[in-house]
Amino acid sequence: MTSAVSIEGLGKMYRLGQRRDVHGSLRDAWERLWSSKTPVPSGEFWALRDVSLEVAEGEVLGLIGRNGAGKSTLLKILSRITPPTVGVARIRGSVGSLLEVGAGFHPELTGRENVYMNGSILGMSRIQIRERFDEIVDFAGVEQFLDTPVKRYSSGMYVRLAFAVAAHLEPDVLIVDEVLAVGDAAFQKKCLSKMDDASRGGRTVLFVSHNMAAVQSLCSRAVLLERGGIVVDGSPSEVIHQYMGGQSALSGEHAWDLEGAPRSGLIALRAVRVRLGSGAVVGAVACSEAFGVELEFDILQSDPRIGMTIVLRNSEGVPVFTSLSSADPEWPLVSRPVGLYRSTCWVCGNLLAEETYSISVVFWSDNYQLSLSEQDVLSVSVEGPCRARGDYMGRFDGVVAPVLSWATSAHTIDDRCVSGEDTATQG
């Protein structure tokens, strides 16, 4: 089978804390004189290392992994946005990419003008774009704002129009990053259907997503990246299982030193842990046990209004629940100066079914503005015996297994008949 994408020994290295020397320039002298920032230590960071991969024509490949695993870097190299440091990446045919909101759009141009410009960048003639124009606009659902500059579009409108252009101009290889998460549920469904149609038409799709259900249903193959390298390459179910429930993720704790901690201008995340009421840090809990998701973090600026969110997903990537720290009645009243903090969200026992769940963490500031997001940072395994099963030992469907109250009383056949006759008479 012919390869649409061929990657051999690919690597991408960035130099940290270094910039091009500007000997003797006025700007250099000015910055040396006035800069109050501490110099950042220089060093090498390999976002990708020794990646080799073949993707066949018509194949839908899912790329999954935690934030910083190298997924987006790989897609940028394949899209010719950034060159590799070592290795070779070859693509057979034309490429359509959707890597970030508004990529390839000019904010001062209207939606109509950007469709023509973006189509031209993708190698289509004006006649070809005109033939598909109405279909693109209808798919994106932005007809009312077609002659409005896209700088006034919402992020969702940006994504809808950008995806519509990339998908309807029929590139041989369609590359889609996590930006579909910006769209609403109905549009995401349309996008997944369009990508499925593209693969059935013989086109190749590379798809990055944290939505494991979408990867499972759409992709014919999946690859798990960790620290810039390929860990698993196989069927979606096999790779997702490794990603969601690997033993390395079930230690009960994911911790960083201060220098390596995920951070924003407000927050540095030091650790995420699963704790029992006894204080023990565990990677697995019994169905009947309550457990806490503990966040340890540094606040880097004095008195910000910081809030936290945790999201639990099952092994298929389906969200089970979301919890916000604003549920704490004292949250709006607490002033938080610079320092180290711990915040714990408690999950009650007899709630979750037997399954391995991933934990994602989000920090936000005033008015729920996103500050820091770490997806699938830790996993917890919920194990039996599950009281909701009773003595039933077969498959137990559902993402939750609460112990609910049941009440059963005996009724005679005559009682039911009388009740039925009375109902019929009243009708």
Image: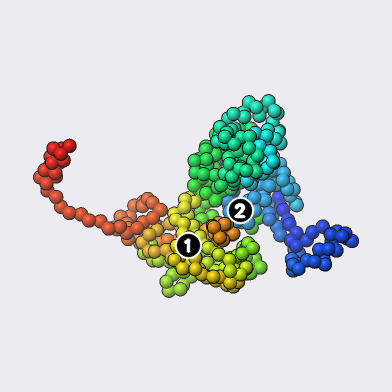
Residue 30 left/right relative to 188: right
Residue 385 left/right relative to 63: left
- Tell me which amino acid carries mark 1: Ser
The residue positioned 54% from the left and 55% from the top of the image is: 243
The residue carrying pointer 2 sits among few (fewer than 14), some (14 to 19) or many (20 or more) residues within 10 Å by Cα, namely: many
Q: Is residue 199 visible?
A: no
- Residue position for label 2: 225
The residue positioned 52% from the left and 62% from the top of the image is: 308
Residue 388: x and y in percent read: 32, 58
The residue positioned 49% from the left and 65% from the top of the image is: 332
Residue 321 left/right relative to 29: left
Q: Residue 117, relative to residue 400: is it above or below?
A: above
Q: Residue 247, relative to residue 84: is it above or below?
A: below
Q: Gap in Å between the C-alphas at discs 1 and 2?
A: 34 Å
Residue 424: x and y in percent read: 15, 37
Q: Quadrant of the C terminus?
A: top left
**Which one is earlier in the sequence, the residue at label 1 or at label 2?**
2
- Tell me which amino acid carries mark 2: Leu
Residue 264: x and y in percent read: 63, 62
- Residue position for label 1: 326
Name the mark nearer the viewer: 1 or 2. Answer: 1
Q: Residue 94, relative to residue 243: is it above or below?
A: above
Question: Which of 274/302 is in front?
Answer: 302
Q: Quadrant of the N terminus?
A: top right
Residue 378: x and y in percent read: 52, 61
Image quadrant in which you'd find residue 200: top right
